[in-house]
Amino acid sequence: MSAVPVSTIVLHPRPAAPAPAPAPEPASPAAGGARDAWSVDAVQALFELPFADLLLRAQLVHREHFDPNAMQLSTLLSIKTGGCSEDCAYCSQSSHHETELKAGKLLEVEAVVDAARAAKDAGAGRFCMGAAWRSPQARHMEPLLRMVREVKALGLETCMTLGMLDAQQARALQAAGLDYYNHNLDTDPDYYGAVITTRTYQDRLDTLEHVRAAGVKVCCGGILGMGESRRHRAGLVAQLANLDPYPESVPINQLVPIEGTPLAGTPPLDPIEFVRTVAVARITMPRAVVRLSAGRQQLGDAAQALAFLAGANSMFYGDRLLTTGNAEVDRDRDLLQRLGMHANPPGEPGTNSRNPATAG
Ligand code: SAM
Ligand code: DTB
Ligand code: SF4
């Protein structure tokens, strides 16, 4: 394991007064201790730290739990595209918006398995299947369960994102071999109503509860750059960090502005603020795998490298996300190589041995 123990990192004495120290990290859920909640104020205080202090803190936390040079690679496939009844203001697939996207049917199982095999051959460790639904219907379950079984049989980790699930659907997916379910909180509860009106924050929390109760690992994050404030970003991170336990996997998306959606003209987020958010996620959720998700093309190599320093240790890998482009595979391989980073083999989370939450 190449993770550098914190004790071996030489820190130069700080010449000036130390930056204010935000609240201590709450007791780890894996340690079974009582958890303190992260207040939004405490999370915002992390955001306000000088950039170098914030990144150092994030790196120390990261190195304590993970190999800092390991990258988890997930490939996405849209298994059912467009025509969605929800009104998420960022989304190309909502039938409430006039976008250029053509709606399709649920893909055949064989087509999904072929795409998963290609993703594995290209080096992905996890295959994430996304459907533009409010929630899956009963007739969808049989093909979905076959997809999970057959993708899993290839030796890939499986992930799905299908909208809201009830308890029974979550249990059926778990029994088929689903490793992760992605369901994002997307933003702060106070900003949520400006983005989505067709389902509530509580609906999302309920689905996360069903996923957790079924024994499927939780992949839950949000979107930055939708016009929210720093306070809202702190509120989102506090919500995620206060889930008990916090998600195993935290995707941080940057808004991909899509023509025809209400958020199309939103000014881009400062990349430094994006990196700050990654660092704050790392500090507040030390054992979570933090994923650079949508928006990597806009971030560019230098900001992504900073985000890796800030504790991001996963990315979407493959030329497409769901309906938009992603950084190209050759470019990502080149980026990892220039940074001396390596991809995790499938099923291997790239943790160090002190990480009970994701080591098994
Ligand atoms: N329909 C399901 C749902 O919403 O739960 C699953 C698919 S949905 C596309 C998954 C997530 O992708 C959303 O929750 C959102 O966080 C992210 N996403 C969708 N469109 C995006 C965009 N234009 N920019 C950034 N992230 C986006
Ligand atoms: C997540 O948090 N981001 C992914 C995945 N989960 C399903 C989706 C990103 C979608 C970006 C816009 C698109 O391609 O449509
Ligand atoms: Fe539908 Fe998901 Fe897009 Fe919302 S984010 S419109 S639920 S596909």
Image (spheres, rainbow, N blue to C red):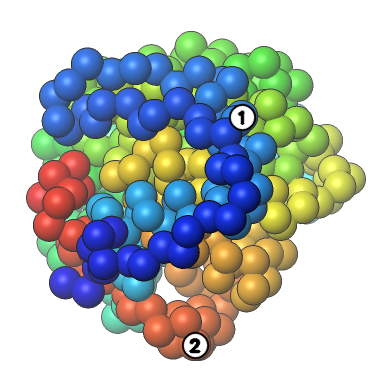
Dot 2: what SS? helix
Image quadrant occupied by the N terminus? bottom left
**Which residue corresponds to mark 2?**
338
Q: Quadrant of residue 320?
A: bottom right
In the rendered view, does 252 fall on the left or right side of 172? right
**Position of 166 relative to 227 (above/below):** above
Amino acid, disc 1: Gln
- Measured from the top left, where is residue 58 in percent x and y? 45, 51
Report if residue 93 is visible in the image. no
Residue drawn 69% across the image and 26% down it: 231
Residue drawn 61% across the image and 29% down it: 44
Q: Which mark is residue 341?
A: none
Amino acid, disc 2: Arg
Residue drawn 22% across the image and 35% down it: 216
- Measured from the top left, where is residue 96 in percent x and y? 75, 30
**Which residue corresponds to mark 1?**
44
In the rendered view, does 106 fall on the left or right side of 83? left
- Measured from the top left, where is residue 193 in percent x and y? 70, 17
Judging depth in this view, the residue of 287 and 8 nearest the camera is: 8
Q: Quadrant of residue 248?
A: top left
| CB contact under 8 Å: marks 1 and 2 | no
In the rendered view, does 177 fall on the left or right side of 331? left
Q: CA distance from mark 1 to mark 2?
A: 33 Å
Q: Residues within 10 Å of mark 2 (few under 14, many from 20)?
A: few
Judging depth in this view, the residue of 141 and 286 nearest the camera is: 286
Dot 1: what SS? helix
Q: Quadrant of residue 298?
A: bottom right
**Position of 16 relative to 24 (above/below):** below
| Total marks placed | 2
Judging depth in this view, the residue of 99 and 143 nearest the camera is: 99
